[in-house]
Image: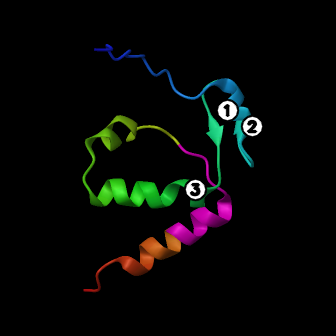
Amino acid sequence: MVRPQLRVYFGPSEDALTSGPGTSVSRNTVTVPLGEVFGWLVDAVRSGRTWLRDFEDDEVTISADLYEVILAYQHYQRPSA
């Protein structure tokens, strides 16, 4: 019987990171379109994934116009008195 060989996965290679369309990479950051991640984040929040807590204090950079839209949305989502 052949024994299965196990390998440790260290994430994608740097070649794979830099070759993706619309993706720019520096040492510890990746820039991707919001549409590429927000569906997964929504699913993770709805599913109560605990790994989200690991990133609660991380800062994200968004465009000023998106921030304004989020503030307006937040304002209109408040329950009325």
Q: How is the image coloured?
A: rainbow
Q: Is residue 2 left or right of 61 when viewed as pictured?
A: left
Residue receiving disc 1: 16
Residue 79's quadrant in the figure?
A: bottom left
As drawn, 5 above or below 63: above
The location of residue 70, given as percent across then percent down, is 52, 68
The Cα–Cα distance between marks 2 and 3, rounded to whole angstroms, is 16 Å
* The magenta segment: 60-70
Q: Identity of the amino acid at label 2?
A: Ser
Looking at marks 2 and 3 on the same chain, the residue that comes earlier in the sequence is marked by 2
Q: Identity of the amino acid at label 3?
A: Glu
Whether the magenta-drawn stretch holds residue 14 is answered as: no
Crowd class of label 1 (few under 14; some 14 to 19; many from 20; radius 10 Å): few
Q: Which mark is residue 41?
A: none
Q: Identity of the amino acid at label 1?
A: Ala
Q: Main secondary structure of the magenta part?
A: helix
Q: Is residue 15 left or right of 28 when viewed as pictured?
A: right
Q: Which mark is residue 19?
A: 2
- Tell me what residue is drawn at x 57 percent, y 71 percent: 69
- Tell me what residue is drawn at x 32 percent, y 56 percent: 45
The Cα–Cα distance between marks 2 and 1, rounded to whole angstroms, is 5 Å
Q: Is residue 49 left or right of 36 when viewed as pictured?
A: left
As drawn, 35 above or below 76: above
Looking at marks 1 and 3 on the same chain, the residue that comes earlier in the sequence is marked by 1
The Cα–Cα distance between marks 1 and 3, rounded to whole angstroms, is 17 Å
Check whether the beta carbons of the residues at disc 2 and disc 1 lie within 8 A of each other. Answer: yes
Q: Which mark is residue 36?
A: 3
State the residue lying farthest toward the bottom.
81
The location of residue 34, given as percent across then percent down, is 59, 57
